Amino acid sequence: MTRYHTLLFDLDGTLIDSVQLILDSYHHTLRVHGIPARSDDDWLRGVGTPLRVQFAEWDDGSGMIEALVATYREYNLANHDSMVTVYDGIAEMLQAVRAAGHRTALVTSKNRQGALRGLDLTGLTPYIEELVCADDVVNPKPHPEPVEMALRLLGVGPERAVFFGDSVHDMHSGRAAGVKTAAVLWGPFGRADLEPSNPDHWIERPQEILQLIGA
């Protein structure tokens, strides 16, 4: 019996390389609305949480936050297909995971439309059984709700599940939901950034996921 049977994955910075597109979208949004620029590091601290969380300080009841989200999404979708790529080794890893009979789900803070577009563009759709997106939950990561929902959709418990992600928000969400956590190191964050979240496993290359689960 393998140690893990259920594999949950974050999307941006974990399966697909979309980080520069995300940062460009934030910078564009503030510029369009005449808001002083923020640094990449400012935005990166919130990567892995939904847009409304990132833009929360402008939620003053005037409709500004809705305008910011709309501007972000318009720019992001317009530039998505020319900027998003799949990380080397991810497709082969997922194919092997499914061939070995393991269960899979995506747990992302992106909305469903954007998540499906990323999966379709990179050819990963066939390898993901269930999706939990920002518009599916009341409480996004780092709350446990998204991970708990993924487990319910798959019809499995947390005992043999592991959540792979690139941010502290992923690690906190997985731990709170009772699954093991695995920090991947090919995204925008290094070991020093993720160590405070105390992941159960460190993953430097997608091939190591297969070694971890014995596929």
Image: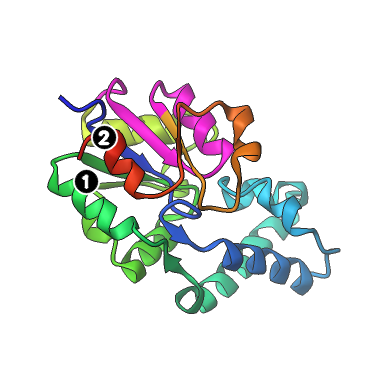
Report how many numbered discs are placed on residues in the image.
2
> What amino acid does circle 2 point to?
Ile
Q: Earlier in the sequence, mark 2 or mark 1?
A: 1
Q: Which residue is mark 2?
A: 213
Identify the residue shown where x is 41% and y is 55%.
15
Residue 143 can be seen in this image: no
Identify the residue shown where x is 41% and y is 49%.
205
Percent coordinates x, y for residue 100 in the rendering: 14, 43
Percent coordinates x, y for residue 125 in the rendering: 27, 60
25 lies above or below 62: below
Image quadrant assignment for residue 112? bottom left
Task: Classify the position of the C terminus by image quarter.
Answer: top left
Identify the residue shown where x is 65% and y is 46%.
46
Q: Is residue 164 magenta?
A: yes
Image quadrant assignment for residue 88? bottom left
CB of mark 2 within 8 Å of CB of mark 1? yes
The secondary structure type at the circle numbered 1 is helix
Q: Is residue 61 magenta?
A: no
Q: Give the numbered dot on residue 97.
A: 1
Tell which of 167 and 145 is nearer to you. Answer: 167
> What amino acid does circle 1 point to?
Val
Q: CA distance from mark 2 to mark 1?
A: 9 Å
User: Horizontal placement of 207 versus 172: left or right?
Assistant: left
Label 2: few (<14), some or many (≥20) within 10 Å?
some
Percent coordinates x, y for residue 163 in the rendering: 39, 35
Q: Which residues are magenta?
A: 157-180
Q: Which color scheme does this rendered protein use?
A: rainbow
Task: Classify the position of the N terminus by image quarter.
Answer: top left
Tell which of 198 and 48 is nearer to you. Answer: 198
Percent coordinates x, y for residue 138 in the rendering: 49, 37
The secondary structure type at the circle numbered 2 is helix
201 lies above or below 41: above
